[in-house]
Image (spheres, rainbow, N blue to C red):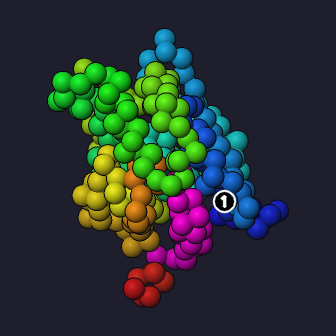
Amino acid sequence: MQDPDSGSYLVLSLNVSPSLRRLDQPLLKLLSQTHSVSQWEYHQTEDEPCSLTVALVLLHDYLKSCPRPVHLIGHGTGGLLGLLYARQHPKRVKSLALLSVGIHPAVDWQAHYYVQRQMLSCSREAILAQMAQHLFKSPAALPIPMFRRIQMLERDIENSLSPHSLFRRHCLPSGNISSPLMVCGGAEDIVVDPNQLWGWQKLLKPEDRIWSCPESGYFFHFSHPELLAAQLSEFWSSCAVPAQALLQSS
């Protein structure tokens, strides 16, 4: 769907992790050069329960004011929220782009962190430092000092919508998405590994696609925004092509 006033696609980025918001900005800045991009954010305090249901209601209240379907995009739990919304309200979603969301869509970096907490006899601080090293492993992350990366992860545990805890990890089904779907991930991601990413292949429709970003990890959208922006723009353009045409050209 294109905005007739600007000739660009209507894109809505979902963010449910305030402490990691800055990691979305390089990609959104690039996309905004050619598309109408907005960002929907969900904030909660430490005293509020993590509720995907509440977030879905608020997101729907927002999207009810949009006159046309939008291209949804989300990283991690933001992508999970987009997936759940696309299932409930497919007519409002022109397409769905999932970043670092595997075939087990509830698995995010926090689920990985809590598994490490249970398996390793290390302190919380040591595990966070190790994860900060791996999750931010890219040249683009070098300007972010290690102590700042650890801070961002600590705050994400406290204030994000992730449904996981030290005592319980959630599992949600994948698939059942009628809108065109694009699934993207980092080729060297330790959280959503290649098996998780390519596990989507068995559920893809003719118009869907998978893209693996080379030499990148969980936050690949931050480390390689130019590559991802090009892939997303091509995908959104293809959404205007009927499925039958895609079948004939394949």
Q: Amino acid at mark 1?
A: Leu
Circle 1 packing at 10 Å, graded few (<14), some (14-19), many (20+), is many
User: In this orientation, which residue lies closer to the viewer: 104 or 67?
Assistant: 104
Viewport quadrant of the N terminus = bottom right
Residue 153: x, y in percent?
A: 45, 31
Residue 84: x, y in percent?
A: 43, 42
Residue 182 at least partly seen: yes
User: In this orientation, which residue lies closer to the viewer: 163 or 67?
Assistant: 163
Give the residue displayed 46% in from the left and 21% down from the top. 158
Provide the residue designation for mark 1: 31
The range drawn in magenta is: 221-243
Q: Is residue 227 magenta?
A: yes
Residue 93 at least partly seen: no
Left or right: residue 5 compared with residue 96: right
Is residue 175 depicted above or below 2 in this figure?
A: above
Q: Secondary structure at mark 1?
A: helix
Quadrant in the picture for residue 2: bottom right
